[in-house]
Image (cartoon, coloured by chain):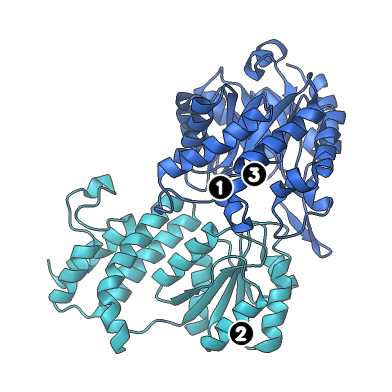
Chain colours: A blue, B cyan
Amino acid sequence: MQPIAAKIQLQKILISDGAWGTFLQEKGLAVGECPESWNLNRPDDVLAIAKSYIDAGADMIETNSFGANAFKLTPYGLADKVYELNKAAAQISRKAAGDNHMVLGSIGPTGKMLMMGDITPEQLYNAFRDQAIGLSDGGADALVVETMSDIDEAVLAVKACKENTQREVICTMTFEKTGEDAYHTMMGVTPEQMTEELVKAGASIIGTNCGNGMAQMIGIVKAIRLVNNTIPILVHANAGAPIYRDGKTVFPETPEQMASYVCAVIDAGANIIGGCCGTTPAHISLMVETAKKCRV
Amino acid sequence: MNNDELLLKLLECVEYGKVNKDAPYPPQMKGQDGADELTRQALAQGIKPADILDNALIKAMEKVGQKYAEKKIFVPQMLVAAKAMNTAMEHLKPYFSSGEVRKKGKFIIGTVSGDLHDIGKNLVAMIVEGAGWEVIDLGVDVGSQKFIQSIANHNGAVVGLSALLTTTMVNMKSIVMDIKAKYPGTRLIIGGAPVNESFSAEIGADGYASDPQGAVSYLNSLVA
């Protein structure tokens, strides 16, 4: 399949998928249950999520593998299943995507901090490498390292993907607004710093995910564009910040509210737009329709 | 250096995370004495351990917590400061054991059932410890029983509940209820990315902190 970065040269705007984690919970994933275990135990439910985003009109879908690294699987007693769980994750999304849609193998942070001496850079690299190989073997077209806050961990993950697979590598970090036109990750990384480091590490698409809703993504995309005018940018936004209502937690932004920012995000310079926590096929479907009408 | 200068220098080392002379961080303090050397020197010079604690270490960590709350510094700067603080505290341990210096009180902290995230909880634990409290860290995936057991062992401790996930924050409610049923006098404070003031009120917790310094302010208000 043609690389995503090349497609962007031709088509400019692509739509990605929405949430997986919150979707799994709706389907009955229990608190304390390993989401990735469903790739082996309940593959049909995972497939249904993947398919729902293809049906909504997404050009690409992710895989149910966000936390499928050795560190996060250890408490579930699944550390020896890294390859299997990732391969199955990619196979399921591949099945839903067919030949005409792309599959992005999801790789999340390990939850360990290099700075604390929790782990060594080599251990981190190896964990990402094992995940990347499983996803690649399962048929992912690209790998997306996401929700990163530490630039050193992000760079190690990008390199591990780049050096051990033939796949295109995407990397997105999670920022919060820290002042007028200022954005930082929890670890203090700015969009500008991220751009420089990730491009150097070999990412062919960069961007931002999670966060507090689509509106804030505009400023982050602008900040990236200030320092790099050519790198394709991906945005996966939450449906707003979570609120507690009637005994459960909900993400408040409706498909209409999220879609209302789509053209502004594209205008700021984004090339791929999709959702993160709390977004549904309805959100994606409306993004697809809206993006067609934006002035490019 | 006279006593005041020395305490000021020590405060600066902790604030900027200068652990010891050999530590390469922060670059602008390269080659200078760090928290390790200066604490030893302060004790040798006859400065009272309580003075070192109150006028250098706790003040430094308060500045760190404040700057973090104002988003002027981020997690890495907080971590190195806590490391410098801990290094200095090692030298003060004998005085805590002997009773010459005292902690402000006890704080039990844990990430609630079903949630395995510990970064935020660890940061709060460090800053609260740096503020002069004894911290009992129960780890992650902690349920009512474990909290209650710990309260039984640490009479009068304040309890902090942490959660990162929208699915696990709801577990805070039952934990608060269980603890309050068994130990009605226990003060409970909650924190974590998805929770806020109104959620705290709704589940019957006594307080909410949006950042580690907020937890310290709450705790200090109980003993002021």
Is A228 positioned to the left or the right of A280 in the image?
Answer: left
Q: Which residue is mark 2?
A: B186
Give me the residue at 56% from left, 17% from top: A230
The chain ID associated with circle 3 is A
Q: Nearer the viewer, mark 2 or mark 1?
A: 1
Considering every residue shown, the one lying at the far top of the view is A10
Label 3 with label 1: CB-CB less than 8 Å: no
Q: Is residue A40 visible?
A: yes
Q: Amino acid at mark 2?
A: Thr
Q: Which mark is residue A211?
A: 3
Q: Position of residue A226 (x, y in %)?
A: 52, 25
Give me the residue at 67% from left, 75% from top: B205
Q: Position of residue B224 (x, y in %)?
A: 47, 83
Query: Are callouts 2 and 1 both on one chain?
Result: no
The chain ID associated with circle 2 is B
Is A234 positioned to the left or the right of A258 in the image?
Answer: left
Q: Secondary structure at mark 2?
A: loop
Q: Amino acid at mark 3?
A: Gly
Q: Earlier in the sequence, mark 3 or mark 1?
A: 1
Check the picture and name the quadrant holding the N terminus of chain A: top right
Q: Position of residue B190 (x, y in %)?
A: 62, 69
Is B83 positioned to the left or the right of B223 in the image?
Answer: left
